[in-house]
Image (cartoon, grey):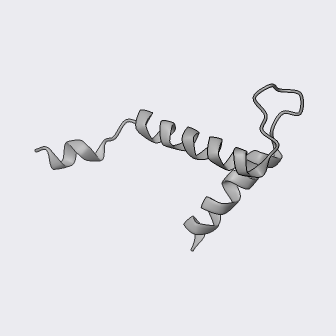
Amino acid sequence: MNLRIRQVTQPVWEYVNQPIFDRQSVWKPGQFWYVYKINLLERCWQKESTSQSHFSQ
């Protein structure tokens, strides 16, 4: 349950706390959600996975 709440509140928190005069700020909620999902996917791909080494032994 706590994970589900965090998954919802994290994007909302990032949307509300965008820099006001930054060119990369996205003010349309639908467009922000699209950009947020892309950035999240990129962060997941760049994250180093330690659990993979457990299965390769």
Point out the residue furthest to the left here.
Answer: 57
Q: Position of residue 20 (x, y in %)?
A: 89, 33
Q: Quadrant of residue 31?
A: top right
Q: Nearer the viewer, residue 43 or 30?
A: 30
Q: Position of residue 19 (x, y in %)?
A: 84, 33
The reply, left or right, for residue 29 in relation to residue 6 is right
Q: Nearer the viewer, residue 3 or 11?
A: 11
Point out the residue furthest to the right here.
Answer: 21
The reply, left or right, for residue 33 in relation to residue 55 is right
Placement of the C terminus among the 4 image quadrants? top left
Measuring 74% from the left and 54% from the top, which residue is drawn there?
12
Measuring 67% from the left and 49% from the top, which residue is drawn there?
33
Q: Position of residue 32 (x, y in %)?
A: 71, 45
The reply, left or right, for residue 43 in relation to residue 18 is left
Q: Nearer the viewer, residue 25 or 17?
A: 25
Q: Quadrant of residue 1?
A: bottom right
Measuring 67% from the left and 54% from the top, which residue is drawn there?
10
Q: How many marks?
A: 0
The reply, left or right, for residue 57 in relation to residue 43 is left
Q: Position of residue 49 (x, y in %)?
A: 34, 40
